[in-house]
Amino acid sequence: MIRRVASLLLLLACLAVVPPVWGEELPLLDRMLERFDALDHYTTLLDSEGEDGRNRIIYTYKKPGYIRMDFIRPHKGARLIYNPHENTVSLRPFATRLLTLTLAPDNRLITDPKGHTVDRSDIGALIRSAQRYGREGTVTRLPPESVGTHLCPRILVEGKQVTYLLWVHPELQLPIKVVKLFANGNRETVFLRNLVVDGPLDSAVFEP
């Protein structure tokens, strides 16, 4: 999913550390993971941009790990559903029902060049990845910044190979914008637009 690293790092070096966002009873990433663990499902428009171009996907997640992706760009009309109990992916590559494929989640047809797989694509997996890099490096709170209509707390996670910038929804306490910087200079930016947690959800949404 997602260069100009030198200018961004210069900007970050000028930013001051701000007070804790939600109090000091839990580290911020732990608090975010706690919030994720408490939810049942969510829906969002994933809007990402990186070296592979722009992607727009309607993404629906439900515990214990059901995932549905409805593709807008690229592959408009394609649909992918992951079933955690069967550990299989149902892929309908076209808008019509003429062809449906059953694949393993690590099948190369549905794995991106960086090795991302559908079964580890949810917000919880993102937070755990940031925690892992934070443990080997540093986690810093930055001044808040607006994303759309929300004034969002920000977190900088600097690891040895990857750096994350997270903009966190002030009420949902979940990330709604992520910038991921790689040691080789590559960059990914992902927006989780219109994030709705535990809203109405059709029980048939994860049926192939």
Image (cartoon, rainbow, N blue to C red):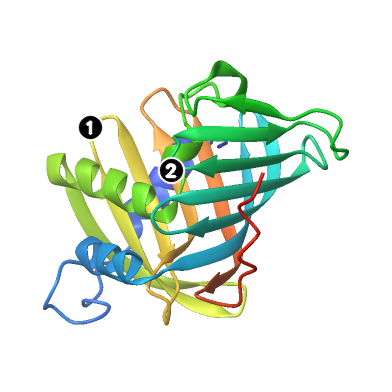
Q: Residue at x 58, y 64 (%)?
A: 43
Classify residue 149 as left or right of residue 117.
right
Q: Which residue is mark 1?
A: 160
Q: Which residue is mark 2?
A: 84
Residue 28's tag is none
- Residue type (three-letter) at the residue carrying disc 1: Lys
* Image depth: mark 2 or mark 1 in front: 2
* Quadrant including the N terminus: top right
Residue 6 seen in the current view: no
- Mark 2 or mark 1: name the one nearer the start of the chain: 2
Q: Position of residue 6 (x, y in %)?
A: 44, 37
The 10 Å Cα crowd at callout 1, few under 14, some 14 to 19, many 20 or more, is few
| Relative to 93, residue 179 above or below | below
Q: Position of residue 3 (x, y in %)?
A: 54, 33
* Quadrant including the C terminus: top right
- Residue type (three-letter) at the residue carrying disc 2: Pro
Q: Secondary structure at mark 2?
A: loop
Q: Secondary structure at mark 1?
A: loop
